[in-house]
Amino acid sequence: MEPVLIGELLAGLMFFGIIGFLLLGFPVAFTLAGVSLGFGAVGMFFGVFDPSNFGSLPNRYIGFMTNEVLVAVPLFIFMGVMLERSQIAEQLLLTMGKLFGNLRGGLGISVILVGAMLAASTGVVGATVVTMGLISLPAMLRAGYDPKLATGVICASGTLGQIIPPSTVLIFMGDMLSGINSQVQMAKGNFAPVPVSVGDLFAGALLPGLLLVGVYLAYVVFKAITDPESCPATPVPPEEKKYLLREFMVALVPPLLLILAVLGSILGGIATPTEAASVGAVGAMILAALRWRLSFSILHQTVVSTATITSMVFVILLGASVFSVVFRLMGGDNLVHEFLSNLPGGRIGAVAVVMAIMFLLGFILDTFEIIFIVIPITAPVLLALDVDPVWLGVLVGVNLQTSFLTPPFGFALFYLRGVAPADLPTSAIYKGILPFVLLQIVAIAILFAFPGIVTWLPRLIAG
């Protein structure tokens, strides 16, 4: 057999081997690195892989550590965890619940709107789902909400932080697509390509994020009209209405100012994502201090949580780097290029197939695991086919938001199950997310059919 064919065969087997080991429950980062090293050894035996290629890994790791853009990741995580500790989410949920309580489906509407607000100010999915599960789920169940609708709304709204900026997923994708796009354009003879930045992805994701919020709200309104018993109104006592406006302003204005300071500075070109993230981190501490929630204990908990989440993500990134080196240098790039280039439908068909593969991987892998594995493999081919990098990045972001909702490894389901009442069956949570997964697919189809929803705002900002 030809060495090229052996290399491509090993690259394909390695990809499926990693999926198999992950299904067995092995840690992701070590599975990526360990299986890749094993297949690299097999490739050495057949003469299709040179072990000296591993010499590039230290430079890659140093590049990650010195990458100024990626410094924004721990800063945004710190901001999100600090805001969660300051109980801003609780105040928002309680106030919005009162504001919309007189409407059928009002509690569901308030959860979606608060989920969008928290997504734009924290971006930490786990903290958002747990907070809304602890506060809103008991209230919705007491009000007579269908448990499936209540759990579905909470899970779906909690995952909005994956696509609404500032999203850590978009930061990593922006950095990856920027480098890949530069390499692809230079290979095509364009030595002055238009750069792709994290700010472009933030701008591109803003309208799709609002589209998802609108789709969720439309579904709750539809349920309120067609099945009013599933989401009854919860009237507010007259004595509580007196101070509702003041409570609303106190709950809404501080996080709104923080969102404007962070996203406004990025989209307006005033600050880089890293600079804006530092402003957000300081702003979160100021808001916590104003609420008398800033103490050494809370600061310590926030720092530990930030370090834990950041370390988890970057260790996966290091393992994915080993996979990328072995896969590409054994001919996996050529295998993927031939597969995607020969699909019917050209670049649109290729993007559709990659989206379908990512959607299926979302059932068994986490968001970061998927982007670190799939983006380096498929993005060079798709960008070489003249796919817009910003559109591709946002489309992937919306697609992978679904991975938090799809069983068996949907983390939003685990988070909610952990705080839901013991008498609420797990089957209700799983059934509750099904309509929202379908709504996600509808949103992806809309973005697929109308790319301008993604590309209009970045182009407007760029002038």
Image (cartoon, rainbow, N blue to C red):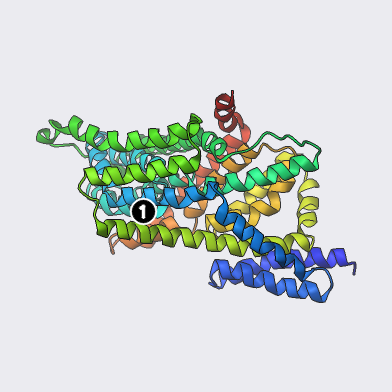
Q: Quadrant of the N terminus?
A: bottom right
In the displayed structure, does residue 303 sit left or right of residue 365?
left
The image quadrant that residue 387 belongs to is top right
Which residue is pictured at 25% across the width and 51% down the height?
Answer: 294
Q: Which residue is mark 1?
A: 127
In the displayed structure, does residue 321 sit left or right of residue 401?
right
Whether residue 359 can be seen here: yes
Given residues 224 and 163, the one toward you in this image is: 163
Whole-percent x, y for residue 443 in the image: 53, 38
Whether residue 362 can be seen here: no
Considering every residue shown, the one lying at the far left of the view is 239
The image quadrant that residue 348 belongs to is top right
Given residues 351 and 45, the one toward you in this image is: 45
Whole-percent x, y for residue 77 in the image: 42, 51
Q: Amino acid at mark 1?
A: Ala
Whole-percent x, y for residue 112 in the image: 36, 41
Which residue is pictured at 58% across the width and 55% down the height?
Answer: 64
Given residues 448 and 207, the one toward you in this image is: 207
Is residue 452 shown above or below 59? above
In the displayed structure, does residue 15 sit left or right of residue 259?
right
Which residue is pictured at 47% across the width and 58% down the height?
Answer: 310
Whole-percent x, y for residue 201 in the image: 56, 38
